[in-house]
Image (cartoon, rainbow, N blue to C red):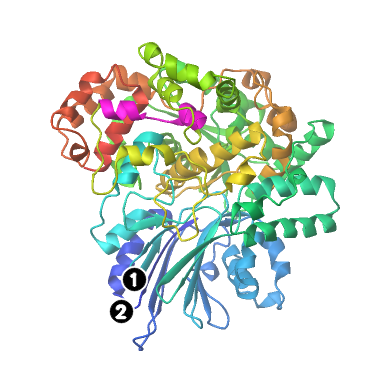
Amino acid sequence: MCGIFGVINTNEMIDESRVISARDVLAHRGPDDAGIYFSFSHSSIQPNVALAHRRLSIIDLSPAAHQPMTSEDGRFTIVYNGEIYNYKELIHRLTFDVSRLTSSSDTEVILNLYAQYGKECLNMLRGMFAFAIWDDKEKTLFAARDRFGIKPFYYLQSENEFIFSSELKAIKHYKGNLTTNYKALDAFLRTGSVPAPMTIYNEVKALLPGYYLVWQKSNVKCQKYWEFSYLIQKSTVNSNQSANNSESIIHSVNQQINQSSNHSSIQSFNHSIIQSRKYDDNARQIIREALLDTVRAHLVADVEVGAFLSGGIDSTAIVSLMRQVGKEKIKTVSIVFPESRFDESKYSRLAAKKYNTEHVEIPFYEKDLIEDLDKIFSIMDQPTIDGINTYFVSKAARQAGLKVVLSGLGGDELFGGYPSFYRIPKYKRIKNLPFARLMMRTLAPLLKNKLPAKAIHYMKNPEEPNAEYKLVRGLFTEEELNAIGWKPHSKQTSALSLQPSVFSHQIMNDSMTKNDLSSPSLNGSIIEWLNDKQFVCYLESTLYMANQLLRDSDVFSMAHSLELRVPFVDHKLYEAVLPYLDDAYDKNFPKKMLVEAVGDLPEEIVHRPKMGFTFPFEDWIRNGQLKDLIIERLKNSDSELRTCLPTGKIEHLPLNINKLHWSRLWALFVLNKYKE
């Protein structure tokens, strides 16, 4: 895991000291080594290039794995952040004498795969990655991001300059003043995070998961190489066809998708390719093998690999699977709270004892959050209502001597652990009953003071894109924003113009110029072929997980130079699980597939109430020192939040502290603090 940064300038020479300074803003991402590469042109028509890297050494700890890394012939140079778990297998895909490889790193494998296969190498990679490769012969830059968006890639394109980085703060440091994207602020208050490809700055975009980017002659083109529907197609084909035949069918399906330019061609797919399969003993074995395989793959490292252990099903399953694949020494880390309602130490200790781990517990108090709050906001690349839990448990893991940890993130999204898996289909069925929508609109005004604001908004607007998901996952409704006087910068957007599209699943065009907050990875016509549970999995994976959980996990773990790996967020595991998700789902036993496949989880953990990996924010905001801090800072705010609220409104926000849901109040505080 590392930090990458780069600049291409077609107008003037690049200042080496500025590049080094921006690179070192990312020093927390890579304290072990630093490198820089320059390609200067003496011609006015050729670009000047700088690639920079900060290294956290995990695989091949030797200087041979130093980055930027240049190919043997001097043509290609790479900067790369992430881990490719199948890199040893991929060495055999190289056609030259592999004894010429100068390191045992995954970086060199990617570099040579690209030199040999070009963009097609992306389909071979299993892991998390964001990288950029400069072709000094063709004067082009190729960059790519992993399928789920585990690793970040931000870029800025202007008339004469292209800049990219692992974090926004390095681009801002290099470029200077960047202007606030008020659409992003608005989207944050509606969803709890800033949805890609937008960022908090107008000038900067996030490369979408499953996309690659090509820079050539000051032009940037983004193209999709992977989308969520491939999971359904490949998993179903693989379960019905021989290996050779399935490859040809997959190639045919992918070719149809890639070549299609409109919905009609997409709709020509064979509907039977995407289907639900019966969950039986054979399915359990397929899922078990896939789980063992992904955990085994995620343990590849030349340093110790530990695990977060909250005592919930997901983290306990990870630790169990680590044991089952033969890992002998396991160090686990958890945070415990003095507030008994949130203290999971009973369960994490139970799991640690069962699997004989070296368990580290870190007590956590409200004062710890307050003491680190300013540092947390300085780390926060974009406003988010989540991630602080990851900050503190990552801090604890690093203090315990770990450099790499496995996390149970993604278990709920894949195995149906959220209430959204039964609520969204239920709400959709209800609204599609005869006269239901008319009745909902009629009753909404009468129930205004008896139901939550999100429920009333849904009843009034049941036909909005993904209205059910908005009901389950949305933060502020339109009515709530109006009530506090929220008005984003009128020159850029209005709240009304954004509201319908925040949760939309219509795919963005490749030019990335649409003013849309879409989930990007699935064509609308294929969505109609997903069953209920697959569709919710898609929404949770491409919206909540991608835009919030994965982004926050990256920035807050890397703040402590800790590599966080997510075995459940693996495309091969998704391929194994998705065909059975609908048939296996049980509202009263939502993660049945995971529990049965792992096989030896303690009953007390399997049947405990779901907690989530959370902190007692609500108690602290309602009754603790955090409440006083929020009131004081909102009253004395001098941030851009003030420019979006009418005069006097921000001073009155703390008076509503007991009326606003804690997450909404926290969101306003985050936005206020972030933009100070």
Left or right of 147 in this view: 446 = left
For label 1, the residue is: 161
**Relative to 196, residue 376 above or below:** above
Disc nearer the start of the sequence (2/1): 2
* x and y percentages locating residue 595 in the rendered image: 70, 28
State the residue at coordinates (70%, 52%).
Answer: 268
Callout 1: helix, strand or loop? strand
Callout 2: helix, strand or loop? loop
Magenta segment includes 471? yes
Q: Main secondary structure of the magenta part?
A: helix
**Relative to 290, residue 249 above or below:** below
Callout 2–callout 1 Cβ contact below 8 Å: yes
Region of the chain picked out in magenta, as a range: 467-483
Q: Amino acid at mark 1?
A: Glu
Left or right of 281 in this view: 563 = left
* x and y percentages locating residue 201 in the rendered image: 31, 52
For label 2, the residue is: 11
How many angstroms separate mark 2 from mark 1 (CA)?
8 Å
Q: Which residue is nearer to you in this view: 419 or 522?
A: 522
Magenta segment includes 525? no
Would you say residue 564 is visible in this rendering?
A: yes
